[in-house]
């Protein structure tokens, strides 16, 4: 499923930089009436992403006893791809 593939690709990038064990949550989730809604972008994600949904993409790395960082963007799912609604330039 695409939800699991998005999460898997995110994990591979983080793992390739040596922080795989420090990424302990899902990659993102749907946003609607509640801030945390399905579908979940995680290894367990089973609900389908559909055009028009708003999702968070929020990979994070946490170093125990030191600090953590999470980069969160909101995206609108388009017919092909997604549009970043956050527009943060890093």
Image (cartoon, grey):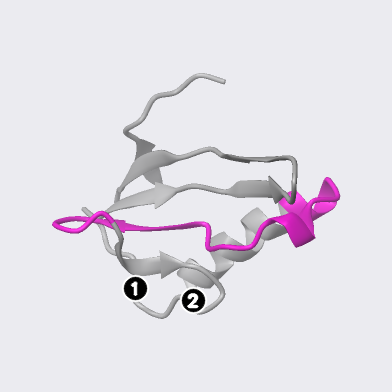
Q: Is residue 10 magenta?
A: no
Q: Is residue 14 left or right of residue 30?
A: right
Mark positioned earlier in the residue sequence (2 or 1): 2
* Residue lying furthest left: 33
* Residue at 34 percent of width and 73 percent of height: 48
Secondary structure beneath disc 2? Answer: loop
* Residue at 68 percent of width and 48 percent of height: 62
Q: Which residue is mark 2?
A: 1
Q: Is residue 22 left or right of residue 47?
A: right
Q: Which residue is mark 1?
A: 48
Pick the residue in front: 84 or 31. Answer: 31
Task: Locate the C terminus by quadrant.
Answer: top right
* Residue lying furthest top: 89
Pick the residue in front: 52 or 60. Answer: 60
Q: What span is in magenta?
A: 14-35
Q: Is residue 64 left or right of residue 35?
A: right
Instruction: Tell me whether the residue at label 2 lies in contact with that at label 1, contact meaning CB atoms closer than 8 angstroms.
Output: yes
Secondary structure beneath disc 1? Answer: loop
Q: Residues within 10 Å of mark 2 (few under 14, many from 20)?
A: few
Q: How many numbered discs sit on the rendered protein?
A: 2
Kindly indicate the quadrant of the structure image that contains residue 20: bottom right
Q: Is residue 15 above or below residue 87?
A: below
- Residue 76 percent location from the top left of the image: 29, 45
Q: Residues within 10 Å of mark 1 (few under 14, many from 20)?
A: few
Question: What distance separates the C-alpha of mark 2 from that of mark 1?
Answer: 8 Å
Q: Is residue 83 above or below residue 61?
A: above
* Residue at 34 percent of width and 68 percent of height: 39
- Residue 71 percent location from the top left of the image: 53, 38
- Residue 67 percent location from the top left of the image: 68, 39
Identify the mark at residue 88; answer none if there is no mark: none
Q: Is residue 24 left or right of residue 88?
A: right
Q: Is residue 17 magenta?
A: yes
């Amino acid at each position: 499923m695409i939800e699991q593939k998005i999460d898997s690709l995110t994990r591979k990038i983080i793992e390739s930089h040596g922080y795989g064990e420090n990424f302990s949550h899902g990659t993102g989730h749907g946003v609607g009436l509640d801030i945390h809604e399905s579908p979940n972008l995680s290894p367990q994600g089973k609900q389908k992403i559909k055009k028009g949904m708003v999702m968070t993409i929020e990979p994070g790395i946490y170093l125990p006893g030191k600090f953590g960082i999470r980069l969160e963007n909101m995206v609108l799912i388009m017919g092909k791809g997604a549009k970043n609604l956050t527009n943060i330039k890093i």
